[in-house]
Image (spheres, rainbow, N blue to C red):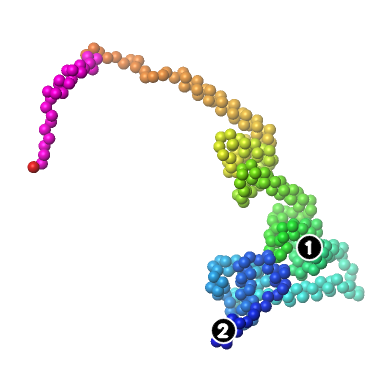
Amino acid sequence: MDDKKNLLLSDTLVPDLFISEYMSGLSLHAVQCYLYLRMTSGGEAFVVEKDLSARLSLTKDEIKGALTELSYAGLLEWKEGGAPRLCDIKAVEIEGYIKRRMEETPIAGAPEIAPENEERDSLARSIEKTFFHGSMAYKWYREIDILLDDFAFDAQVVYKLFQVCSAKNQLGALTQMKELALAWQARGIRTMEQLSAYLAGEEIISLTLRRLARKLHRKMVSYDEECVREWIEKLGFDFDTIDFAIHKIWEYQEPSVNKADTYLKAWHAAGVRTLGDAKAFEADVAKRNKLAYQQNKTARNEAPNGQNFDGVKYDDAFLRSLEVDPVELVKRLKNEKPAEVKTNE
């Protein structure tokens, strides 16, 4: 009874560091799991996924996803028995602070700092001052090292990554930055020149989607983006050619991205690459269709009209058998007796 009363009337402390540096980047389910684990972390309770699912009214898959998210954010680790355990984020932050201060304080007799390390420190200070008001958590220092070493990004690319995430209000947690960094890495981006070319292409795709949305009078979805990306990146079409395909469809039916996709792929297979090629191709198709129509019309006009009775002959006896006097027919019908109807008695 005392344990139950203590649990109901006790308070759960949440580090300010979690609220300021981690919470904004987590999903609702991840925050729920973190708070529940904070509440039970003081006792000897052995919390497993099944317990979390029952107490938080979430499915097992939702619990697994939330715990994976916490682990990915550096907030959770796993015990030997497989139970989740929260990390001491304050201790990690303190250790990082001490390490950073030791690196900043020169030691007598120590070798001079290599130029690449000076560039790294300058990058970290610039990011801290610009995006974190001069106070950046240690996890971001670690992330800068990872981006420079594991991702092999140039310093300018790392700075641009922080700039893009800041513009999208995505500096609350590491998760969204890692997703963007992985997307850049997958496209082979290492230098600022490569990144500039990639961002220019993304701007073209974004502009094309906005212009198509206005023309089609609807909001673009992820499927539309996949098609537009293929038209531009793989097929090499510009917006004018895409717009011409939309207009050609409009001549016959209501246009859509799916119908435009069929048109553009057919053009590409036929060797069309530019707007001029597309217009010439469509003009040639229209010419051939018109010629085929005229040939078909001429063939129909030359065909004989009505029924052909050539070679059919009738003798006089057959024709007389078809002549019936109406008066004689009525008399004959009156003289005929009606058939008897049999009934079952």
Report the residue marked by disc 1.
131
Residue extending farthest top: 316
Residue 139 coordinates in the image, percent (x, y): 74, 68
Residue 264 coordinates in the image, percent (x, y): 62, 39
Name the residue at 82% across, 64% down.
Answer: 129
- Please tell me whether residue 227 is drawn above or below residue 171 in the rendered image: above
- Between the C-alphas of marks 1 and 2, the distance is 45 Å
Residue 181 coordinates in the image, percent (x, y): 72, 59
| Total numbered labels placed on residues in the image | 2
Q: Amino acid at mark 1?
A: Phe
Q: Amino acid at mark 2?
A: Lys
The answer to whether residue 322 is magenta is: yes
Which stretch appears magenta?
319-344
Split into 4 quadrants, where in the image is the N terminus?
Answer: bottom right
For label 2, the SS is helix
Which quarter of the picture shows residue 2? Answer: bottom right
The answer to whether residue 15 is magenta is: no
Report the residue marked by disc 2.
4
Residue extending farthest right: 109
256 left or right of 93 in image = left
Name the residue at 62% across, 36% down.
Answer: 247
